[in-house]
Image (cartoon, rainbow, N blue to C red):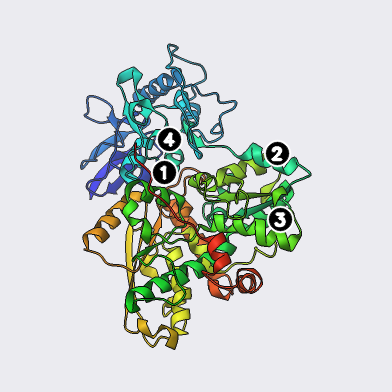
Amino acid sequence: MYNVTINGKSIQVAEGATILDAARQAGISIPTLCFLEHRAPLGACRVCVVEVEGARTLQAACATPVTDNMVVNTNSRRARQSRRTVIDLLLSEHEGNCQYCDRSVDCELKEIAHDLTIEAPEFEGERIPTVLDTSTAALVRDSGKCIKCRRCVTVCNEVQQIGALFPQYRGYDTVVGPAFAMDLDSVACVQCGQCAAVCPVGAISEVGHIEGVWRALDDPEKHVVVQTAPAVRAALGECFGYEPGTLVTGKMVSALREIGFHAVFDTNFTADLTIIEEGTELLMRLKTALTGKAEGYHGPSALPQFTSCSPGWIQFAEYFYPEMLPNLSTCKSPQQMFGALAKTYYAEQAGVDPEKMVVVSVMPCTAKKFEAGRDEMNASGYRDVDYVLTTRELGRMIASAGIDFRSLPDDEMDAPMGLSSGAADIFANSGGVMEAALRTAWELVTGRELPTENLHVEPVAGLVGIKEASLVVTDPLPDWSFLDGVELKVAVAHGLGNTAHLIKEIKSGRREYHFVEIMTCPGGCIGGGGQPRMTTDEIRQKRIAAIYREDEGKDLRKSHLNPQITEIYERYLKAPLGERSHHLLHTKYAARPVT
C-alpha cells in the first residue's frame, strides 16, 4: 500500500493504482472523456490532468500510477486552466447542435464545460465537414459531434473485438469510423450499440423510432400494442432519477398506458415460451447424439447448442463463425416470437385485423432494431415487429408526454401475453437464459426440482466473462433414460470478445459443452447498448441484483409452469417444435460476407 495525499487528504492505495483510482477512492471527482473502466488508459483527451508535486508538467490522472508519498492537487489553478483550454478547443470544432441533440441532457462534454464555467467560446476556427452515416438499421453516426475520445474504438476493438471503428487519417483531419471513412454498413458491424453506450457526446446514437410510434398511436385505424423486455424494468427508473437497480415494472406499465398503447404486454411471456421451445430442441439434439435418432424431430443435431436470443451475437456468428450456424438454436428471440404471436394468436383472441396492428418493442438493445427488420422476420404474414424503442427512447417518450413518472401507480400487464415466470425475468442477466433453461429441462427430465439453492445456478451468474457449470443426470424419468449418468456441461459468455475466445476453445476441442449461452453485451441485456448511460460494473451489479429480486419475489419461477404458456399450446401451438411452432417461432440464419 502507498501513502498518497490528494487535495490535502491522506489515503492509502494499492500499488499499481492510478491517480484517478486514488482520487475516486478518496471521493474526489476528476473529469474524463476517454477513460473506460477495465481498459488500458489512453491519456488521449487530457481532460483529467492534475498537478503532482515535483513534476515539471501536468500529469494525466488516468494514466499516471501513484508512487509512495505522492502529493497531488487535482484542483489547482494550473490544472483547472489546462482543462478549460482542452474543453475550449474541443468545443471550437464540435458541431453540437445542443438545442436538438438527443444527448443535450446527458452530454459529458457539456457537463464538464458547465462545471468549468465556460460561458463563451475562447477559440474559433475551421471545422471539418459533417458526415452523417445512416446506413444501418440501428445506429447513426454524426462526425461533426465526434470529439475523437476513442472510447468507441476501445469498446469495439477490445471489448467486442469486432474492429468496425478506427481513427482514420492524422492530426486535425482525424475521423473516427470504419476503414477508409466508409459507412458502417460496409464493415462487419453487429450494431450492438456499445459504441453509442460509451460515447460521451451525440456522435453515435440509436436510429430513432419515437416519431414512428407516435404516428401509429395517433392513427385511429391502428391497434398499437407494446412489449417490454425484462432488462428495461431494472434500468428505466434511471431516466427519472431513481437509483440504478430500482425496479419500476408497475410504473412502466402505467406510463405505457398513459402514452396510449391499446395493450401492454411482457416480452417475458415469450421468454418463457423460448425456454419451452429451446429446451425441447436441446433435448432432441441430445437424444439424437446419444441414441442415433429422436422420433419426429427433423431439426439440426449439432452440439453444443447455442442460444439465439441476442441479435448482435447472431450477426457475429453470421460474419465470423458461419461454420457454427448449425449449432445455433433455431428459436427466434423472445421479441420476434412475441411479434409473430401478437399478429396471429392475439389478433384472433382480440378480434383485431393484423394488418391494422402495430407491434412496438421496448428493448435494452440497439441491435433489436436491426433484428426486427430482418427479411425472415415476417412469419405472421406481416412484419412481426414494427418499431423498437430503446430504454432511453422510452424515457424520452414518457417525458415528452408530460407524465410524472415517479407519481404513477403500479399497474399490471394485460392478458393473454402478460403473465410470466421469474425464469423469464432473469433473461436480462448474463447466465439467466442458462439458469431458466436448466430449471425447466432438469425438472422435465427428472421430475424433480433443480438441486440448487433457491433455484439459482451460481457458477453461471455474475460478471466473469466466461462461466462454466455441470450437472450429472441421475434417475431420469423413463422417457429420458438415455441421459442417466450423463454430465450435462454448460457454458456462458457475455461480450463478444469473450465469445470469440470461448468459440476458439470449443473448436480446438479443449472445451466440450452441451449448451452454451451467449450475450452480446457485457453483463447481458442489463448492460445493453440502449440502456441509460453510463453503464459501469457497479451499475451492472445493481441491475443484476434487481432482476434476481424480481425473480425471487414471484410464486411462479419456472417457465413450464406458466399457465398462459400451457394455454397457448393447448389452444393454438399444440406442441413444442410442432408444425405451427416451427412456422411462427423458429428460423434459420446464413453466412454474411465480410467486406
Q: Earlier in the sequence, mark 4 or mark 2?
A: 4
Q: Crowdedness of circle 1 by 10 Å Cα count: few (<14), some, many (20+)?
A: many
Q: Nearer the viewer, residue 235 or 342?
A: 342
Badge 3 element:
strand
- The one nearer the camera, 25 or 241, is 241
* Residue at the image point whose x is 35% and y is 29% from the top: 45
Category of crowding for the residue at label 4, using alpha-carbon neighbours closer than 10 angstroms: few (below 14), some (14–19), many (at least 20)? some
Residue type of the residue flagged with mark 4: Asp
Q: Which residue is mark 4?
A: 185
Provide residue 222's location: percent of width, then percent of height.
74, 46
Q: Which residue in the structure is indicated by mark 2?
A: 215
Q: Earlier in the sequence, mark 1 or mark 3?
A: 1
Residue 528 in sight = yes
- The answer to whether marks 4 and 1 mark residues whose Cβ atoms lie closer than 8 Å is no
Q: CA distance from mark 4 to mark 1?
A: 10 Å
Q: CA distance from mark 4 to mark 2?
A: 28 Å
Tell me the number on the disc at residue 190: 1
In percent of the image, x 38 and y 44: which residue is there?
Answer: 592
Vertical position of residue 555 compared to residue 425: above or below: below
In the rendered image, residue 330, in percent from the top left (x then y), is placed at 45, 61
Image x and y of residue 411, in percent: 70, 60
